[in-house]
Image: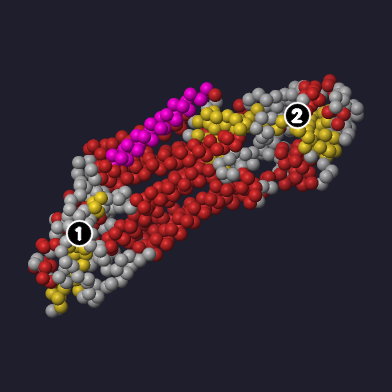
């Protein structure tokens, strides 16, 4: 019962997630013989499947990390004996919140479990979302120049065409090609010509602008070999003016950053490069000349536009290991933690009502701030003021500072990535409009939204590791933001519940077995109407971030349609649309936090927050009002009930009152009157 039920539910959740992860890993492992593809086919279907999988992953990770956070809070919750030991030293512990302060006073076994749960969260943040990822198919292509006659079966001198390399050594004295290297051609012009003539549906005629828009990409999707149509042959002493076809280069021969350098006549690659803007400017002139050929149109060979959803077995195994570690740690808490921690302020009030803490006697109106300033000072009565503080004061400046730091870093990171993404899309592909961003979608792999200029490895294990870290580092940052948000919300709700006892008589909300008027606990200190939306918000943000920057793979086929492992790459993709939605949800988070912080607490009680000394100071009831099982209320104890001489203090002939929780009658404190 009590907190053990919550911890047991957390352990059950961890084991359910473990079984699901184990099943996914076994299923994915059976697909590794097919290159790790769990699905290969239509890109729209692949995108939908990838989105559904990542939504599921983020729900599972939120449940797992929620169970872990619950267990960690149970571990760092102090026992009464630990609190008394700390109070004797003039310090205090936090009650009802996740607390670093409490760790140094914990039993080594509980501290070890807390650290293990915390450490096991790191790899889950960094790798879980990359267990499944999407890839698309890139087509390398051979580039031909041909006349309309050739498309209709016109004669050409095949002996003049190169067969094993670029062949024509471009040695024009006005252009230096001496340092350029070229890959071998892999297609046969005769076969290409035959296919065009007898299977015209395999090729598509494109106008110049469409041709450039399609091929001015680092990766080509849906098309392969390209024929540029020209109204005249290139004048060269080794090629007859009657030839109807020639070829100059393969996309494999071009530098990785200039795979379409031919659009800018190729010889300029080494000096000025060839970006989308330069190529588009040349195409827009209407008089496009490439390598001396006046281009009138294009004929592109159609290719399968295939996408796949892939599984990474190594990451799957890693997730299982740390998932199992979390499940074991939470189970150990349920079985081996025998003491009764004070998880909620209700637990603490009940304990201090039953056995008052001598160290806190006489401080009934002291706030947490005052305990910090005069831990060992002489007890002094304090004038009561009916000041109505706002909730943000209860959370403390340090908690707000941590939250705003994480929020600031997170929002600056997303805004920077968004600016980078839009800049690259505009500069390289002229796709920075709102319509373009919407069409690009979320988490969708395309040739225009891949990171290819960050000096990251693109092949092998190092490429996978680097891309995974780049894609998931924002996840760890987001988890820090969620924890700090959860912390300030918990502290503000704790303060609201505390202050409500000054206006309403009610039973304590406890995490142990209930007695009398005592009530069941919420999700620790946070009511379900708050904790569930917070978890949904966390899952939504984690999913949006996973769609903003994500692991992506490019599987490459050579011009003949055969796999080309050396040209396949692993990198990261980005989605400006997902980043925009992340920013919008982030704006909701900050508005919610600030709005909640500006709400006022109920009138009357000092703001003690989670401070154990402050809570204890408010729990020195009269003998006739010390029943913690009854409905309680905080207020000024009537003089007639002050039977304890220590609770009666006179200062310069002025009678000093006493405030406390009590199961008997209490009055509203009087403004300006002294209380101790």
Q: Residue at x 41, y 55 (%)?
A: 403
Numbered badge on residue 502? none
Query: Start and end of the magenta stretch?
Result: 7-33
Labels in figure, total = 2
Residue that numbered label 2 is attached to: 201
Asked whether residue 613 is in view, the answer is: no
- In this view, the residue in front, 624 or 431, is 624
Q: Residues within 10 Å of mark 2 (few under 14, many from 20)?
A: few
Asked whether residue 312 is in view, the answer is: yes
Residue 27 is a magenta residue:
yes
Task: Work out which quarter of the rendered image holds the C terminus and state it.
Answer: bottom left
Q: Residues within 10 Å of mark 1 (few under 14, many from 20)?
A: many
Q: Residue at x 71, y 43 (%)?
A: 275
Q: Quadrant of residue 223?
A: top right
- In this view, the residue in front, 557 or 506, is 506
Residue 287's x, y, as percent?
84, 43
Residue 23 is a magenta residue:
yes
Numbered badge on residue 631? 1
**Quick one: SS at disc 1?**
loop
Q: Residue at x 25, y 50 (%)?
A: 520
Residue 29's x, y, as percent?
47, 25
């Amino acid at each position: 019962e009590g907190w053990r039920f919550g911890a047991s539910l957390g352990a059950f959740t961890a084991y359910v997630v473990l079984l699901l992860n184990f099943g996914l890993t076994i299923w994915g492992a059976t697909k590794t013989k097919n290159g790790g593809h769990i699905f290969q086919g239509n890109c729209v279907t692949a995108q939908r499947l990838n989105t559904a999988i990542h939504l599921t992953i983020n729900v599972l990770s939120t449940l797992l990390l929620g169970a872990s956070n619950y267990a960690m809070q149970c571990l760092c919750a102090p026992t009464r004996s630990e609190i008394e030991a700390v109070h004797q030293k003039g310090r205090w512990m936090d009650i009802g919140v996740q607390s670093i302060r409490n760790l140094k006073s914990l039993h080594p076994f509980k501290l070890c479990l807390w650290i293990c749960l915390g450490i096991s969260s790191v790899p889950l943040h960094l790798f879980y979302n990359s267990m499944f990822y999407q890839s698309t198919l890139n087509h390398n292509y051979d580039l031909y120049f041909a006349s309309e006659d050739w498309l209709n079966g016109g004669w050409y001198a095949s002996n003049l065409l190169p067969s094993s390399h670029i062949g024509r050594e471009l040695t024009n004295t006005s252009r230096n090609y001496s340092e350029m290297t070229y890959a071998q051609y892999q297609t046969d012009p005769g076969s290409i010509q035959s296919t065009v003539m007898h299977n015209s549906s395999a090729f598509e005629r494109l106008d110049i602008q469409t041709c450039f828009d399609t091929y001015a990409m680092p990766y080509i999707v849906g098309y392969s070999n390209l024929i540029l149509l020209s109204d005249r042959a290139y004048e060269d002493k080794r090629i007859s003016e009657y030839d109807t076809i020639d070829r100059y280069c393969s996309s494999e021969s071009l530098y990785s950053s200039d795979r379409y350098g031919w659009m800018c006549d190729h010889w300029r690659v080494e000096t000025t490069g060839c970006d989308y803007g330069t190529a588009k400017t040349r195409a827009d002139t209407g008089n496009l000349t490439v390598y001396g050929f006046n281009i009138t149109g294009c004929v592109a060979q159609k290719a399968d536009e295939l996408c796949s959803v892939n599984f990474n077995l190594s990451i799957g195994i890693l997730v299982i290991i740390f998932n199992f570690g979390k499940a074991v740690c939470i189970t150990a808490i349920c079985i081996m933690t025998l003491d009764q921690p004070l998880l909620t302020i209700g637990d603490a009030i009940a304990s201090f009502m039953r056995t008052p803490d001598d160290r806190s006697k006489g401080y009934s109106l002291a706030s947490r701030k005052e305990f910090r300033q005069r831990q060992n000072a002489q007890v002094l009565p304090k004038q009561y003021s009916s000041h109505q503080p706002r909730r943000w004061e209860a959370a403390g400046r340090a908690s707000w500072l941590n939250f705003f730091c994480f929020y600031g870093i997170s929002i600056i990171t997303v805004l920077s990535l968004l600016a980078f993404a839009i800049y690259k899309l505009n500069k390289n592909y002229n796709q920075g409009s709102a319509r373009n961003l919407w069409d690009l979608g979320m988490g969708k792999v395309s040739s225009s939204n891949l990171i290819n200029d960050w000096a990251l490895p693109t092949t092998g294990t190092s490429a996978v590791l680097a891309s995974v870290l780049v894609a998931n580092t924002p996840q760890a940052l987001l988890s820090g933001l969620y924890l700090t948000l959860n912390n300030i919300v918990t502290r503000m709700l704790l303060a609201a519940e505390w202050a409500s006892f000054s206006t309403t008589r009610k039973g304590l909300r406890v995490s142990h077995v209930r007695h009398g008027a005592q009530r069941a606990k919420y999700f620790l200190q946070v009511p379900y109407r708050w904790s569930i939306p917070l978890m949904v918000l966390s899952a939504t943000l984690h999913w949006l971030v996973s769609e903003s920057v994500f692991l992506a793979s490019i599987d490459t086929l050579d011009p003949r349609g055969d796999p080309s492992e050396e040209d396949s790459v692993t990198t990261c993709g980005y989605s400006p649309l997902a980043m925009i939605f992340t920013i919008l949800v982030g704006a909701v988070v900050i508005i919610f936090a600030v709005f909640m912080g500006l709400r006022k607490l109920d009138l009357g009680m000092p703001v003690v927050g989670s401070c154990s000394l402050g809570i204890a100071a408010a729990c020195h009831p009269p003998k006739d009002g010390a029943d913690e099982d009854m409905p309680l209320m905080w207020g000024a104890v009537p003089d007639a009930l002050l039977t304890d001489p220590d609770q009666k203090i006179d200062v310069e002939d002025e009678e000093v009152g006493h405030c406390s929780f009590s199961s008997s009658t209490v009055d509203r404190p009087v403004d300006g009157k002294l209380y101790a």
